[in-house]
Image (cartoon, rainbow, N blue to C red):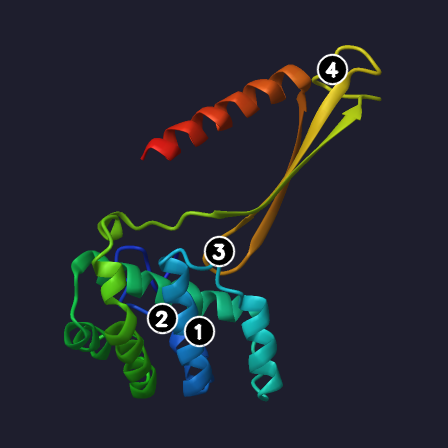
Amino acid sequence: MAAGTGGTLADPWDFGNTTDIIKTIPQDLFAELCEQIIRYLQCQIPAVNTIELCQRFQAAGINIAASDVAKVVNAISFVFSTAAKCELSSEELSTKLSSAAGGLPKQAIQVIRHVWNEQGRSLTAAEDAKHMVAVGQLIDFQWKLGMAVSSGNCKSLKSPYVTIAMKVADASGHITSKTFEMTVSQFQNFYSQFKEMASILETV
């Protein structure tokens, strides 16, 4: 994740020109955005729905693009995950934000502090909070059996094959679709590995 156009992974407190975007978001909608981010980091939701948030902002008369909402989500996600790793109190987080590059609005700092004070403990208490990274989450997985007409994996025509379709969402809500083909033997091996994983998870 990048902390805005002017920020870097090494400095989550540098918001760069993402501050200008945050300034246009009303306090109540910004609070909702922050709460969604916390829920995402807690793995309660698969992603922050930037498209839906963008529509709500526009309905409130705010002219904002989905890509700009995604920048804000990335910046605040990185702030929360960094705060979790460093086990910052709400006061310490507020101090960091007040001295952040980019001049974050006072109201935005108050919202972030409030959300962190109310829900941040669950992140700092999590066993893997210190190892939090931006990992895509599987949204949908589908497969279907077909007959090859032309395929690089099937040597002859009319050979059975399996098509896999996956959808993965990142923290900003961007969904990527991936489709690939397998021979039946490849799919059987794929299935057996998943079955093995399931068996191991059941013993954890």
Please determine whether, in this image, residue 138 is positioned above or below residue 91. Answer: above
Specify the label residue 154 is tagged with. Answer: 4
Q: Which image quadrant is residue 123 in?
A: bottom left
Residue at horizontal 29 percent and vertical 59 percent from the top? 81
Residue 170, x across and y down, in percent: 48, 53
In the rendered structure, are the residues bearing label 3 and label 4 in contact, judged by CB atoms less than 8 Å apart? no
Q: Let me know if residue 5 appears in the view.
A: no
Q: Which image quadrant is residue 166 in?
A: top right
Residue 110, x across and y down, in percent: 28, 84
Residue at horizontal 44 percent and vertical 77 percent from the top? 32
- The span from disc 1 to disc 4 (Cα, nearest Å) is 47 Å
| Mark nearer the N terminus (4 vs 2) | 2
| Mark nearer the N terminus (3 vs 2) | 2
- The span from disc 4 to disc 2 (Cα, nearest Å) is 51 Å
Towards the viewer: 52 or 6 = 52
Q: Is label 3 in a helix, a strand or a loop?
A: loop
Residue labelled with disc 2: 16
Residue labelled with disc 3: 46
Residue at horizontal 55 percent and vertical 57 percent from the top? 174
Residue at horizontal 38 percent and vertical 34 percent from the top? 201
Q: Is label 4 in a helix, a strand or a loop?
A: loop
| Mark nearer the N terminus (3 vs 4) | 3
> On the picture, is 108 further left or further right than 198?
left
Residue 95, x across and y down, in percent: 17, 77
- The span from disc 2 to disc 1 (Cα, nearest Å) is 19 Å
| Mark nearer the N terminus (2 vs 1) | 2
| Mark nearer the N terminus (1 vs 3) | 1
Task: Tell me the amino acid under the disc marked 1.
Answer: Leu
- The span from disc 3 to disc 4 (Cα, nearest Å) is 35 Å
Tag count in the figure?
Answer: 4
